[in-house]
Image (tube, grey):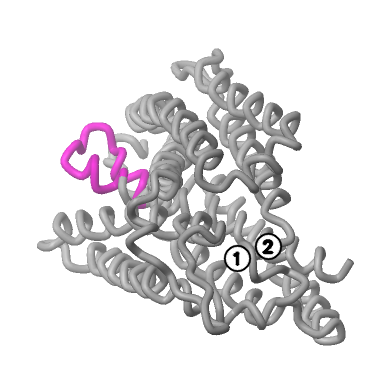
Amino acid sequence: MDVYLAISILWGFVFIYSIMATMDFGAGFWSMIYINKTKTRATNIANRYLSPTWEVTNTFIVALVVAIYSLFPKAAYSLGTILLIPGSIILLLLTVRSAFLVFSHIAEEYKKPLTYISGLCGIFIPGLLISVLPITHGNFVDFSNGGQQLNLVRLFSSMNAYAFMAFAISSTLFLSSLLLADYSKASNEKEAYDTYRRDALIMGPVSLITAFLIMFTLKNESGWIYDKMMQNLPVLLLSLFLFLVGGLGLILPSLKPGYRGMPRLSVIAVTLQYMTASYVYGRAHLPYIVYPDITIHSAFTDPNSFRAVFITYIVGFAILFPGFVYFWSLFMNDKRYQRIKRPKADLK
């Protein structure tokens, strides 16, 4: 029981970070794309989202790493060895993105090139992060002499790995455009809302196509996890239904005059859709952390240590979670902040 509770905590961190990070990275990319289109104020909206959230998002990747070392310490060495090269590249890109994002708000004369670099880094990071998943399927890891080594040649010649990367990038752009559409509507920025709503309508079908591409290539390259996912086909169909609800939310009539669509409904439905899909994938992945040698049972920490860590997590989240909720409510509902950087004519 303890080991399944531990892996649920770890997968919860993975899901929370994946949702928050995709919205964060995508907002940086859209800020880069629309930096020269001042009439839509799309970059202004993206920067207003990025400013208070990127630091909060990065705390979850720290929590994820700590969770791996505290809950599954026997897997930490293996994962550290296997992911040494992709992990180092990810950390480098995160550092560059964070630094250039800060400097882009300080050095006005270099704002555009700094924004371009941080935006491009932000779109590459999700693709590299999700490459961890196909790596754990075991096809690209050589187990020999009690050690593990990542075979980069096999990894970068795998269609399944590229399907995962394409899914991560398309999902990043889809989720971020949804959230920015919702935030634009709350900020009463009609042009920006229309822009991000259009982007969401384009990227939604693209992300769905890449999801089907993952399943198609998964069947050929990692049949063991594909077969186990198909055992939860009703939940996958529920995920598809939630995706359709999210798309419908973008075309339904709006209660707000002058707008079309209900982006808040779409954000909630699509987030639930990703949650159900990740549940199916995570359950199918059990009991393996890295197939076929590293399982949650063999890598689990001492039960007494787990209980102590679990109590610490409960206390920590009891303290932090209300703060996160309060922060998010202020960010989405504070009218003064939503009106920052508008022309004076708009403030009258």
The residue drawn where x is 29% and y is 38% is: 41
Q: Quadrant of residue 72?
A: bottom right
In reply to whether residue 43 is colored magenta, the answer given is yes
Q: Main secondary structure of the magenta part?
A: helix
Query: Would you call the spot at circle 2 few (<14 residues within 10 Å), some (14-19), or many (20 or more)?
Result: many
Q: Would you place residue 60 above or below residue 25 in this image?
A: below
Q: Secondary structure at mark 1?
A: strand
The residue that disc 1 covers is: 290
Mark 2 vs 1: CB contact within 8 A: yes
* Most foreground residue, 153 or 101: 153
In-image side of 24 versus 115 (left or right): right
The residue drawn where x is 64% and y is 47% is: 225
| Residue 85 seen | yes
Query: Would you call the spot at circle 1 few (<14 residues within 10 Å), some (14-19), or many (20 or more)?
Result: many
Q: Quadrant of residue 305?
A: bottom right
- Amino acid type, label 1: Val
Residue 51, percent across and down?
Answer: 39, 59
Residue 243, percent across and down?
Answer: 59, 28
Q: Secondary structure at mark 2?
A: strand
- Amino acid type, label 2: Tyr
* Most foreground residue, 171 or 161: 161
Q: Which circle marks residue 288 in the picture? A: 2
The residue drawn where x is 73% and y is 65% is: 7
Q: Quadrant of the N terminus?
A: bottom right
| Residue 53 seen | no
Q: Which circle marks residue 313 in the picture? A: none
Q: Residue furthest right?
A: 1
Q: Would you place residue 296 above or below residue 191 in this image?
A: below
Q: Would you place residue 298 above or below residue 337 in this image?
A: below
Q: Would you place residue 177 above or below residue 10 in this image?
A: above
Q: Which residues are magenta?
A: 30-47
